[in-house]
Image (cartoon, rainbow, N blue to C red):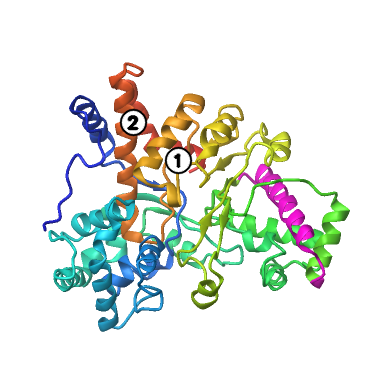
Amino acid sequence: MSLRLHPDRLLPADPRVRAVARRLYAAVEKLPILSPHGHVDPRLLVDDEPFGDPAALLISPDHYVTRLLHACGVPLGEPGVGRGPLPEADARHAWRRLCEHWAVFGGTPVRYWLEAELAGVFGVTERPSAGSADRIYDRIAARLAEPAYRPRALFERFGIEVLATTDDPCDDLAAHRTLAADPGWTARVVPTFRPDRYLEPGREGWAGAVARLGEVAGTDTSGYDGYLRALEARRRHFIEHGATSADHSHADVRTDPLPRDEAARIYRAALAGTAGPAETTAFRRHMLLETARMSAEDGLVMTLHPAVRRGHHTPTHRRYGPDTGHDIPIRAEFTDALRPLLERYGTAEGFQLVLFTLDETVFSREIAPLAGFYPSVYAGAPWWFLDAPDAIRRFRRAVTETAGFSRTSGFVDDTRAFCSIPARHDMSRRLDCGFLAELVAEHRLEEDEAARIAVELVTVNPRRAFKL
């Protein structure tokens, strides 16, 4: 019942290929982490307070963990399975629930990340179970009381060089400003502009959000032109605080243009609450094209994470809110959807577009060919439900023959679970080294070329794709 991290985990099973993969991995294992897309709260690093308890650190912020517990009958309303921090008795209860259900995570990337966190970060050597839960909890809780396990100390230990957060356009970015001005802080923590709620008039609360946007930007948003000026002003605010990208996640990525007068008419109707679903959808698609125009002008990289049915279970969403594990992927289409955008900006100097998907069928059919032609387009790494070993291998096989390695983004961890960041990046490095080792074994690459590519996937690609 021991817990240990095998040094060859995720590397190819063939001994000859594994030997090559080991050498490639040795070249990237200790390289700094560049995390260009994630959801860690920057105030965690400003305050540098000790983490509250093991459940609040490893369970409640990670919907990968809580959604599978919920699927196995653990209610989200149980202490620690929803949000933390918690009283000690409730946190311990939540931890026991995780350990009791340890077997259900077998074969999932969640299991890989949790094992890496437990053994690699906290020195846990006992496999989680109902019998070991309290002992493991006590060990982690004791570690969290030590200065070496505060957020800043772990950030340095993890070797994170750049961390991008995801931020509302109305955020004053005070935490980012504080970190940038701190002479004792040397890493880069940069904001990311996430305007989804301001682009979708069909969302509940949109009119109030737009009014707030105008207040923060110092612009009257009662009309369409003022609304555009407010978005542009907040983008400039983010750029001044180090932002390099703007992130979008809508149901689709259609970029159908509207005549300016029609966009203004729908905008006024939406503010009045009289715009219909077809109109609000048309406006959102038009605004995705407009934000591409803004990116072409101000240089923020445009990243798209489409095709998720958010809040799939309405009763759960009403009771527990967003990001509680029931966002479900749907089909995606990029080629025709993005043609209006790429006709205008696909070859524009300085414009960059990173395409992510949860629909694997479009990797080879659409995203790789787009990235293989347009100098602005990069194939985004597998994320969310696809940042898993077999899916990452399928991504490399689907994309590489058409777009090569240089047209891919580098890995994104997309996580709120702070301690899982190094585990996720390590997983990606091991898998990429395994894929490269197969190419070497098939005499499709020389080993020195594979070593160079392995390093570039970690160091060059994310800098280039996200303008880091």
Q: Position of residue 231 (x, y in %)?
A: 69, 58
Mark 1 neighbour class, 10 Å CA radius: few under 14, some 14 to 19, many 20 or more: many
Left or right of 197 in this view: 429:
left
Which residue corresponds to the image point at 37% horizontal and 46% vertical from the top-left? 388
Which residue corresponds to the image point at 37% horizontal and 70% vertical from the top-left? 60
Viewer-proximal residue among 268 and 162: 268
Viewer-proximal residue among 137 and 198: 137
Which corner quadrant of the image does residue 345 belong to? top right
Q: Is 86 colored magenta in this rendering?
A: no
Is tag 1's residue or tag 2's residue first in the polypeptide sequence?
A: 2
Q: Position of residue 14 (x, y in %)?
A: 21, 28
Which corner quadrant of the image does residue 261 belong to? bottom right
Which residue is labeled 2 in the image?
435
Q: Is 295 colored magenta in this rendering?
A: yes
Which residue is labeled 1 in the image?
462
The answer, for residue 36, to whether it is visible in the render is: yes
Most prominent secondary structure in the magenta stretch?
helix
Q: Distance between the residues labelled 1 and 2?
A: 19 Å
Up-down relation of residue 248 to residue 314 (above or below): above
Q: Position of residue 257 (x, y in %)?
A: 78, 46
Q: Is mark 2 on a helix, strand or loop?
A: helix
Mark 2 neighbour class, 10 Å CA radius: few under 14, some 14 to 19, many 20 or more: many
Q: Position of residue 323 (x, y in %)?
A: 48, 65
Left or right of 90 in this view: 264:
right
Q: What residue type is labelled 1?
A: Pro
Q: What residue type is labelled 2?
A: Phe
Question: Magenta segment, which residues?
Answer: 272-299
